[in-house]
Amino acid sequence: MSSELVTKYFREDRLPHIWCPGCGHGIATRAVMEAIDRLGWDKNNTCIVSGIGCSSRAPGYLDFNTLHTTHGRALAFATGIKLAKPHLHVIVLTGDGDTSAIGGNHLIHAARRNIDITTVVFNNNTYGMTGGQYSPTTPFHDKGTTAPYGNIDQPFDICNLAQAAGATYVARSTVFHPKQLSQMVEKALQKKGFSLVEAISSCPTYYGRKNKKGTAVDMMNFLKYRAVSQSKFDALSPEEQAEHVVTGEFMNRTAPEYTESYQKIIDLVQGREESK
Amino acid sequence: METETKLMQGNEACVAGALHAGMRFFAGYPITPSTEIAELSALHLPKFGGKFIQMEDELASMAAAIGASIAGEKTMTATSGPGFSLKQENLGYAAMAEIPCVIVNVQRCGPSTGLPTSPAQGDVMQARWGTHGDHPMIVLTPSSVSETFSLTVQAFNLAEQYMTPVILLMDEVVGHMREKVNIKELSQLPQINRRRFEGQADDYYAYRPDQSLTPALMPFGEGYRYHITGLYHDETGFPTNSTDNARAQLKRLHQKLELGDNLAMYEEVEMEKEVDLMILSYGSTYRSARKAARKARKEGKSVGEFRVISLWPSPELAIREAAKKAKAVLVVEMNEGQYVQEVERIVKSKSEIHFLGNGAGELINPEEVYEKILEVLTCQANS
Ligand SMILES: Cc1ncc(C[n+]2csc(CCOP(=O)(O)OP(=O)(O)O)c2C)c(N)n1
Ligand code: SF4
């Protein structure tokens, strides 16, 4: 299955990729390709857009219309593509820093507009590409190169943020659960509206080392331990909750989609012009 | 029946020109004195099947405009000083990734939020050097409402022809002034569309340039799958760290504009002979300079006029040749001295250069220019 996927969707001449051994980003990328494969989407009508970061290098390896933009701005570029040509499928692959720090404003507004773009956030709780600084999702007290004494920022819950801003599909899984992750991405891709899937990923090279999380395998096992359902999470004490993260589907609703609403304006205005 | 002439505001003429050039996408964020451009785009674009979007800020507007251009539309965004500063990173992206797009900056008085709605021409150097790196830039500056229409069309045409962002650098006076324009004549202006690759998708290299050194980027969604990045890349579009490749790419970015014979835009009046003084100006300031020069000439003084239309790339050859015919050059601009530095660089002290400027949000009126002319000429007579 995996080698077939590689032949079908990866630009083999672009491999090997730049990701470190044990990095979770490859698994997340594969989960997205599996979802596209199950949907049988035409590669010519699919655009994959990213910002800057290790995660954002993913589109370069994928055989679609791919766009590697500036740090944090992927959703704004993607909005232009989608609104200009609504028949194109537009997917954004991004990191936690890319999308929730420098790109936080674009995230909430893309969700608010409910434009039909699927965002997959590879959340490794750190800035991998620049060497392990703390990010808006670094857990309280965890370390980063710019938080040598422990992080005192309160972390964002990206799924909560997207939901509150108006996204129509929001879900979270981890790279330890690639099947669930891929199924969530598939649902997100099918959703008419703004959808976001958070893929908890791992960066053994920086986040893992800084926070003494052990080997890449240890980190994967930690993801397994960390992920719990909402009901299990609710039963935990606040101290225990800090160790865990809820996975599952948080939002699945329908709402007017932006490019469709705009098309209605065009139809209305052009109809009026004709009847003049 | 199409009426011949229309009373139009500069910002309105910009939108009319853009629509004539084929604009089908506008992304912006409101800021005075450019806001009418967004408002009129929102009103008119849907009539043409085009799209308008008010983004969350100027960074996003620039990004969305680039995205829509990648999807094949002719796109524009408009702003004023503070917003122009925010657009810079993605403006550089458009230059690097060779994405056509028109960026309008209706200048107002700065620095920072400055004097909102007061006129200035303080973004001349920002237009040229605002973003990081060494790429060239095309910057056009209109002096009248009618010319705002025609230069907007030209901005779109150059963007498509050279696959590059083009800045239309207006000022508040031109943006808000109302003048008669000859619509019939302006609607004869030609439209240029970006080159298309005609071969098989397998033979396609997005960043393989033709003789004009310009690549033919095919819109996303038309069967040519490739990669676009702001990193240095080879002709496939994929990043490479090779400094040899970077050198060649940067050189090509410069050379493709150096090949442009319609890039040097300027206008000369009374410069066919030697003059005692040549006034060089641009944008709305030229209108005051022109009035002062005419008054001086009527009094028998030898004064020529040089109006720069393409600020960047500068009409170097023309400025140098014209300056040779002038005993002195007077640069007048609504700032504390920006383009005068470019003129000094070009003329290389072969001519005496004088400067009259004001960056504090006030128009330079014809009387001030006239007095400066007298001052320079008296100096000359006494030396
Ligand atoms: C404007 C700007 N600021 C900073 C950077 C440097 N930078 C590159 S990637 C990155 C963080 C990436 O982190 P994340 O999005 O979490 O992705 P990861 O590398 O962890 O996958 C930063 C700060 C940049 N490229 N551009
Ligand atoms: S630095 Fe971290 S996030 Fe980046 S490739 Fe290596 S493991 Fe992955």
Image (spheres, coloured by chain):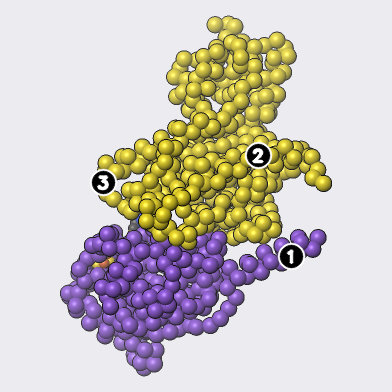
Q: Mark 1, chain letter?
A: A
Using the numbered discs, state the Cα–Cα distance from disc 3 to disc 2 in whole angstroms. 43 Å
* Within-10-Å neighbours for mark 3: few <14, some 14–19, many 20+: few
Q: Residue at x 69, y 14 (%)?
A: B297
Asked if one can make out residue B213 in the rendered structure from this viewpoint, the answer is yes
Instruction: Identify which amino acid the numbered label 2 is placed on.
Output: Leu
Label of residue B242 in the image? 3
Using the numbered discs, state the Cα–Cα distance from disc 1 to disc 2 in whole angstroms. 28 Å
Instruction: Give residue B307's position: percent from left, percent from top.
Output: 60, 26
Instruction: Identify which amino acid the numbered label 3 is placed on.
Output: Ser
Q: Earlier in the sequence, mark 3 or mark 2?
A: 2
Relative to B229, is A135 above or below? below
Residue position for label 2: B189
Label of residue A271 in the image? 1
* Within-10-Å neighbours for mark 2: few <14, some 14–19, many 20+: some
Relative to B161, is A154 above or below? below
> Is A132 on the left-hand or right-hand side of B140?
left
